[in-house]
Image (cartoon, grey):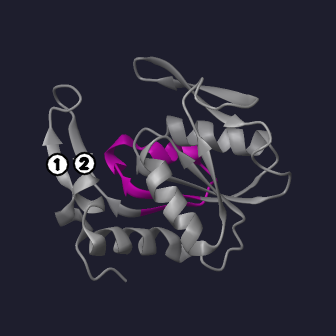
Amino acid sequence: MLTIDLKQMIRSVPDFPKPGINFFDITTLLKDPAGLQATIDSLAAPYGSANIEVVVGIESRGFILGSAVAQRIGAGFIPVRKPGKLPAKAIKEIYELEYGKDALEIHADAIDKGQRVLIVDDVLATGGTAAAATRLVRQLGGELQGLAFLIELTFLSGKSKLTGENVFSVLQY
């Protein structure tokens, strides 16, 4: 399906945010009109006929990709944010990191019971953030149809925290 090599458009930044980490910077991909269009087309393609009602985007690059995917497939968009960023009543999900804990929040009225939901983010790494977003969707009664990522870092085995879920990634490293 892809006629553009998206991997060639992603900048690799060694030792960011700390030594030993190789950061895949998608800003170089997003600034290119053809690269951005190919990215959104690739993320949306598996869900075009899935009757997705809302796309949940995980802060912050998931907002960029998720809102574009939502527009492409004719769905609404819902942000999942770090604690304290949402103005109305929210529910929180705490998850483990390799070095501590973090949390995500979603508005308590964001998803109607039974709504068909797609979660979108830029990277699937260890899977903790995606698993937390999945739990938030289910707490609100959403019917999770899948999770879509631009990049999957397969060596970190993030899919293992999403066992039984429909996980799609455009690129694998």
Q: Amino acid at mark 2?
A: Asp
- Residue 68: x %, y % from top left: 50, 64
Judge left or right: residue 131 versus residue 106: left
- Residue 17: x %, y % from top left: 24, 29
In the picture of the structure, the residue carrying the numbered disc 1 is: 12
Q: Nearer the viewer, residue 158 or 33?
A: 33
Quadrant of the rendered image containing residue 114? bottom right
- Residue 129: x %, y % from top left: 52, 37
For the point 60% across and 45% down, which residue is it? 79
Which residues are the magenta region? 147-169
For the point 15% across and 42% down, which residue is it? 13
In the picture of the structure, the residue carrying the numbered disc 2 is: 25
For the point 54% across and 43% down, which residue is it? 130
Residues at discs 2 and 1 in contact (Cβ within 8 Å): yes
Neighbour class for label 2 at 10 Å: few (<14), some, many (≥20)? Answer: some
**Does residue 80 sit above or below 45 in this rendering?**
above
Judge left or right: residue 98 versus residue 13: right
Q: Amino acid at mark 1?
A: Ser
| Element marked by disc 2 | strand
For the point 32% across and 59% down, which residue is it? 172
